[in-house]
């Protein structure tokens, strides 16, 4: 099963490069923020830092959507509908242009099409960048 | 468990997810979770999971789809408790 092919995002809003490990209980994936990403032009003026909302989006795409696609594998669908329903995230370290991050997500529950996960993001030095709980509704279409 | 008691427990479970406080003041068997209390479908899942824990029952997909009002929820809880 190729999760990345089913993932319903594309440039410039795809924030998943590779998935290292996936199971019924969780997922690990990575993404490198290209230095020429569109948001660095304005965040911040002359001092590019990855916006927190983009870090959250990266955590949601890997930690919730990719895991959700895996959990829906029995439905044998080639498309999926997703909607973010809740996010509560704390941020600890900045992520600069070109940095690679690793997202580690642990399933809290997947019931009635709602997937709730505890998600953490680490930088290349394995330091905690941000962590929180993210939920979404996901179903095969 | 009596209907009154179930409604009292439901009111406590639902409270943190309510968006319309005016409607919550009139919480009763005719209250619709989505139309009256303006709870979204994602939070309705959390409510159902809390109901499972509180009443020690398992709620299936069909029951979830039919749980629109407080009265529906009371019926489902009573049925499941009798099955157990």
Image (cartoon, coloured by chain):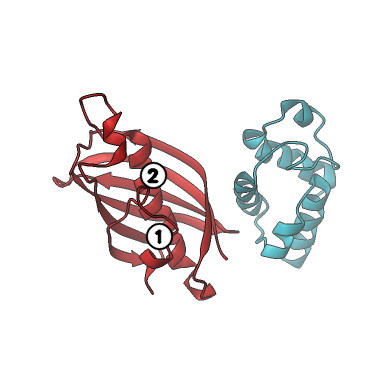
Chain colours: A red, B cyan
Q: Are marks 2 and 1 on the same chain?
A: yes
In the displayed structure image, the side of residue B4 where residue A133 appears, left or right: left
- Name which residue lies at 37% across and 41% down: A56
User: Can you name the residue that lies furthest to the right here?
Assistant: B30
Where is mark 1, residue-wise? Answer: A66
- Name which residue lies at 75% across and 31% down: B24
Residue A3 occupies quadrant: bottom left
> Label 2, label 1: how many angstroms apart (C-alpha)?
12 Å
Most foreground residue, A110 or A65: A65
Most foreground residue, A60 or B78: A60
In the displayed structure image, the side of residue A12 where residue A114 appears, left or right: right
Q: Position of residue B1 (x, y in %)?
A: 79, 50
Q: Secondary structure at mark 2?
A: helix
Most foreground residue, B53 or B66: B66
Where is mark 2, residue-wise? Answer: A57
Q: Position of residue A2 (x, y in %)?
A: 37, 71
Is tag 2's residue or tag 1's residue first in the polypeptide sequence? Answer: 2
In the displayed structure image, the side of residue A29 where residue B24 appears, left or right: right
Q: Secondary structure at mark 1?
A: helix
Q: Position of residue A17 (x, y in %)?
A: 27, 57
Most foreground residue, A93 or A110: A93
């Amino acid at each position: 099963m190729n999760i990345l092919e089913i993932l319903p995002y594309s440039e410039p809003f795809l924030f998943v490069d590779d998935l290292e490990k996936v199971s019924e209980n969780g997922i690990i994936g990575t993404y490198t923020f290209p230095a020429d990403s569109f948001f660095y032009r304005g965040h911040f003026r002359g001092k590019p830092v990855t916006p927190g909302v983009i870090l959250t989006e990266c955590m949601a795409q890997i930690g919730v959507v990719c895991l959700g696609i895996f959990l829906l594998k029995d439905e044998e669908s080639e498309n999926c509908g997703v909607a973010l329903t809740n996010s509560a995230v704390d941020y600890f370290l900045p992520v600069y242009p070109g940095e690679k991050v690793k997202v580690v997500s642990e399933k809290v529950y997947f019931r009635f099409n709602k997937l709730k996960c505890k998600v953490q993001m680490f930088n290349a030095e394995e330091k905690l960048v941000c962590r929180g709980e993210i939920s979404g509704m996901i179903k095969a279409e | 468990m009596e209907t009154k008691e179930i409604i009292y427990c439901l009111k406590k479970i639902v409270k943190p997810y309510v968006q319309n406080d005016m409607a919550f003041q009139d919480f009763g068997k005719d209250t619709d979770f989505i139309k009256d209390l303006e709870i979204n479908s994602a939070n309705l899942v959390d409510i159902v999971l809390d109901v499972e824990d509180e009443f020690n029952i398992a709620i299936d997909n069909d029951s979830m789809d039919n749980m629109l009002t407080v009265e529906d929820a009371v019926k489902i809880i009573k049925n499941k408790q009798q099955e157990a």
